[in-house]
Amino acid sequence: KCEGNYSCQQDIILSDSMIAPPFLAAGELGVHPIETVSAVIEVKSVATAQAMRDAVVNIASVKQLASDEPRGFTEIRGAYIGMGQHVDKPFGGVLFLGSDASDEAILDAYVKAIANLAPNDRPNAVVVVDDFALTWGSYVEGSEQPTIQPEPLHGTHVLLQRLKANALLVFYMILMKILASYQPPELDLHSYVSKSGSYGQYELLVRKLAAE
């Protein structure tokens, strides 16, 4: 089911069971609350325009479950403690095992697929193994080379990097960068109960305690 309060089916989900276990689990299948998910990855055999569109939609269906409301975060690095607000969402990546099209044709298909999505709901990285990576970048004033941005929210350009054997390494580095800093929203189980129709029909017995 790929609508409302559910995402499309995902190939790989990185979920933290220490926050909460899956609502449902059967073998390698599970239903995970978005507050426990830190990354999802779509794995496709061949990169085509249609496969790219499908993968982008699948990734967006996960990210759109995460709230766009700013929430607090805490960053600790040695003696430094920083606090603030962010609107980060889980990592979303697409991994193609190969491609029958040119890298520029895949780039064009990607740009078209993400055109109508909110920046924060776009994939963080796309890779064709042993060929190239599509990442986000932005230009710093005075620099002729773009800086890679792990978060699509902060990217102004899509970068096509022809890296051959190192393409997967860039994908991995962006994934690890997000995992190192991502702080999910707080899990509110009562909201899930309310969305599912509350507790259903039940009987309530109340007794008043006598005052001493």
Image (tube, helix red, strand yellow):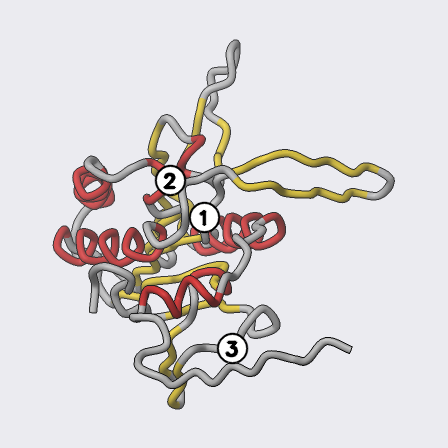
- Percent position (x, y) of residue 127? 36, 53
Q: Where 207 falls versus 7 (above or below)?
A: below
Which amino acid type corresponds to the residue marked 2 in the rendered image? Asn
Which amino acid type corresponds to the residue marked 3 in the rendered image? Pro
Q: Where 181 falls versus 140 (above or below)?
A: below
The circle drawn on residue 89 is 1
Q: Where 188 falls versus 68 (above or below)?
A: below
Q: Which residue is mark 2?
A: 120
Q: Residues within 10 Å of mark 3 (few under 14, many from 20)?
A: some
Residue, x 57% and y 50% (percent of image)? 182
Which amino acid type corresponds to the residue marked 1 in the rendered image? Lys
Is 191 or 16 nearer to us in this picture?
A: 191
Which quadrant of the figure has residue 130? bottom left
Name of the residue lying farthest toward the right: 79
Q: Are dots 3 and 1 in contact, CB under 8 Å? A: no
Give the left or right position of residue 53, taking residue 197 as reference: left
Residue, x 63% and y 42% (percent of image)? 73
